[in-house]
Amino acid sequence: MSQILFIKNASQLLTLKGFSLRPAVKEEMNQLSMIEDGAILMENGLIIAVGLTEDIEREFNEQLKLAEIIDASGKIVLPGLVDPHTHLVYAGSREDEFNMRLNGATYMDIMNSGGGIYATTSKTRAASEEELYADSLKRLDLFLLHGVTTVEAKSGYGLDWPTEYKQLKVAKTLNEHHPVDVVSTFMAAHAVPVEFKDNPDAFIEEIIEEMLAKVATEKLAEFNDVFCERGVFTPEQSKRILEAGKKFGLLPKIHADEIEPYQGAELAAEVNAISSDHLLKASDEGIKQMAENGVIGVLLPGTAFFLRAEAANGRNMIDSGLAVAISTDCNPGSSPTVSMPFMMNLACMDMGMTPAEVITAATINAAHAINRGHLVGSLEIGKKADVLIMNVPNYMQLQYHYGLNHTDMVVKNGTLVVRGGRRC
Ligand code: NIG
Ligand code: FE
């Protein structure tokens, strides 16, 4: 028997329609395609109708007799949030480093003295697959409670094949067993492992000659990412790794220009990356080249907030034609959060984005940043029934009542998985 779910009477239903084939840019990012007193009808995991409540009630009279009905009066309905950049699978936490940074140490100082990514690498190597799964599952539950229905997850706390493999397997198992869709990225090039400190090129050789083939053969990831930053991987080394990944069908992503300007945005354009992420210090020329080459800028307002750095200039980037998405960058060092709603607040406050642009950046544009724009990120007939009900009467209140999680209900693949802010 078919499973039918009907949400009706939404004070505002934000469809974000029209951008399934490419991300929204410039003024389009303000176009939420809102329906007042909106309704959405879902059958067997897919959206089958979107429109005015009275129109759908009239047209789908028969199906509605079999439907579970949810009244969203006084609330808004929008696509499930997509988080396109996380380091979901890791062990441990690093509040000690947070304290060190508040006392004056920098993020790179800590990393160069053996902490930072290295600290999490040691803990992740030591954790069993079961422990890693249990920790990551708790985080994934929290993502869902904050309205996220699709999440990208990077490896990169192994820096050796057994642990990278363990992380990728955990992400794959989570994807199979948890309602949230988990999309994997291979990121062994997250730091040069201590064992290779004197010969980083040998590590790069290992990634290129051995690891990439294994990732591709077992279909463990769709994307290949690298931390292109002074003292980590140079633009030349990053290019080699990303070009090698392409030969195995892995689409390039880059952690670019986070701490220093380092030609990361330019490299993203050159290798035709699907996205280039961070961009706090990206050059105007690099942003222009990214826009020309269809690279999406994934901005991480929580990272700037938590590192007390000046945020990426989202306003300028949008005005210069770059398709912008936002993300938590959830990780234990530079952004230990699972809250897309808080990222949305920060993107308004620190990046000069409007509440409407931020919603686009957290839904359809974020979906495109992980190659899912045709499946999720907007409420359109034929797309996955990933739908949120937020407990605010209009979308501007999402950003205005800041620091809160307004998620009331979450529908994933046509099934209600969160009700009244709790798992069901
Ligand atoms: O995206 N910048 C590099 N990687 C992560 C941080 C990883 C960590 O500190 O554990 C980031 O900010
Ligand atoms: Fe990151």
Image: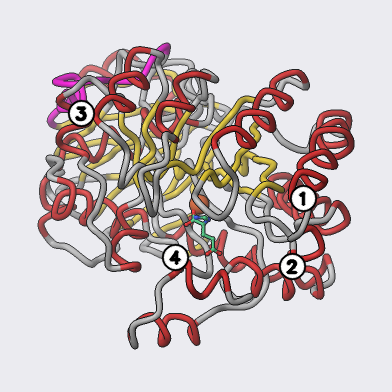
Marked residue nearer the N-terminal end (1 or 4): 1
330 is higher (above) or lower (below) than 281: below
- The amino acid beneath tag 4 is Ser
Picture disc at residue 318: 3
- Of 58 and 120, nearer the camera is 120
From the viewer's perspective, is 74 left or right of 152? left
Quick one: quadrant of the N terminus?
Answer: top right
Marked residue nearer the N-terminal end (4 or 2): 2
Residue pointed to by mark 4: 334
| Tag in front: 2 or 1 | 2
- The amino acid beneath tag 2 is Leu
Marked residue nearer the N-terminal end (3 or 4): 3
Q: Are marks 2 and 1 in contact (CB under 8 Å)?
A: no
Q: Is mark 4 within 8 Å of ligand 1?
A: yes
Distance of mark 3 from mark 2, alpha carbons? 38 Å
> Secondary structure beneath disc 1?
helix
- Of 270 and 247, nearer the camera is 270
Tell me what residue is drawn at x 44 percent, y 69 percent: 107
> Secondary structure beneath disc 3?
helix
Distance of mark 1 from mark 4, alpha carbons? 26 Å
Tell me what residue is drawn at x 88 percent, y 29 percent: 217
> Secondary structure beneath disc 4?
loop
- The amino acid beneath tag 1 is Thr
Q: Are marks 1 and 3 in contact (CB under 8 Å)?
A: no
* Range drawn in magenta: 21-36
Residue pointed to by mark 2: 132
Q: Is mark 2 within 8 Å of ligand 1?
A: no
Picture disc at residue 173: 1
